[in-house]
Amino acid sequence: MDKIVIHGGERLVGEVAVSGSKNATLPIFASSLLAEGENRFYGVPDLNDVKTICEVLKNLGVKIGRGQGGDYLLDGTELAGHEAPYKLVKTMRASILVLGPLIARARRAVISLPGGCAIGARPINLHMKGLEKMGAEIQLRHGYIEAKTRGLRGADIYLDISTVTGTENLMMAAALAKGETVIENAATEPEVVDLAEVLNKMGGNISGAGSSIIRIKGVKQLTATEHTIIPDRIEAGTFMIAAGVTKGNIHIRNCKLDHMEAVVNKLREAGMEILREDDGTRAIGNKRIKSVDIKTLPYPGFPTDMQAQIMVLMTLARGLSVISETIFENRFVHVGELRRMGANIKIERSSAIIKGVKGLSGAPVMATDLRASASLVLAGLAAEGETEVSRVYHLDRGYEKLEEKLASLGAHIRRDPRK
Ligand code: EPU
């Protein structure tokens, strides 16, 4: 299995470009199930999760090709199946994003129920409850969600928790339902807004995306469109922290700062300079890192997907910081590994209490989820000596060519496929 090997201590300097957002691409690709004709999507990141959603969609009859510039062509005119099998869903829970559009368009969907994952139990009860309100009949049998309907109709849906993929699933289902759907306490993440924009370009009638109340007037038919995926705000934040932990100076292109206010504020509070420039953002690490307290929250709060990475910065800060995780119940798997590298972190319930140390020391480490793996790479960049990060397949799910991009900034980092 591949490992990433890092010789830490290099100051990262130079320019890097952020890829398209993974979590915007996945629902947007799923939306191709709703439309007649061939969609063209630009700025799609080359990631294993994107390959997986393509497999799920091909299984349902979507034709997928590549344009000359690497853009993706997705044609869902003729759907040919209604099942997302266990073997695909178990590799990527976001496969559940086909449930909403499939039941709306094909009136039938059989989707393997995603199990828990390393970061939490992650139920999808709110996706199902919302679809039932819209007239879907749902049964759970042999590990599969079997959903059918004689036709979805608009409904008033209040989400107990502002679930991101739940909001996306319901928005896609409602786009072809009869009448108006109102989703209250909807997720406001930029990825939800990007999906709404695609659905509207397809001829949908959606307003309020980006606020907590989304109104969707169902239409009879949607037609394929073109769209450029928004930049990945989590990848951009990860590069900012790479500058922070190596006291580097990185110019980040394709970075939408408006999507990153909570992260940028915390990094500035920690002593970093984050500067808006004409064609991107400059992130400059400071010799002295200040400790800050952080609480993960739904957007526009501090994203849980940046929690592991900012924790690495805090391991090197002066003083104590407290990081509270409020979204997922088990998202501190990286803590034990960071401790192996010399970090001083104590966990109390859903909070990590971090006492800054002078430096980290390289060690063999492994992680069980995507963002935790990214945090270990960041720790390796800052550490003295060699760090070997194993289970790199987690990184490949969500970071495009991370080691190549970091190497171009001066990091001593390589992928070691032999070990
Ligand atoms: N929840 C429920 N019931 C539901 C749905 C969610 O109780 O029906 C709970 C979850 O257990 C969790 C909270 O609600 O405690 C929020 O979960 P949410 O549904 O918003 O998460 P998600 O849609 O499954 C997306 C991202 C995650 C990101 C979270 C939170 C995608 C494909 N995934 O997951 O991304 O952490 O939102 O922002 O968009 C990642 O990229 O590494 C990643 C895990």
Image (cartoon, helix red, strand yellow):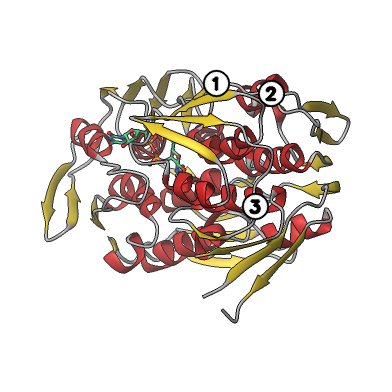
Residue named by callout 3: 361
Q: Is residue 395 above or below residue 378?
A: below
Q: Nearer the viewer, residue 256 or 359?
A: 359
Q: Does residue 157 sit above or below 11 in this rendering? A: above
Residue 339 in the image: state x and y as whole percent. 51, 46
Mark 3 or 1: in front is 3
The secondary structure type at the circle numbered 2 is loop
Q: Is residue 81 left or right of residue 281?
A: left
Q: Ligand 1 within 8 A of label 3's CB?
A: no
Circle 1 residues within 10 Å: few <14, some 14–19, many ≥20: some
| Few, some or many residues within 10 Å of mark 3 (<14, 14–19, 20+) | many
Mark 2 is surrounded, within 10 Å at the Cα level, by few (under 14), some (14 to 19) or many (20 or more) other residues, namely: many
Q: Amino acid at mark 1?
A: Asp
**Front of the two marks 2 and 3:** 3
What is the number of the mark on residue 293? Answer: 1
Dividing the image into four quarters, tell me where ligand 1 lies: top left
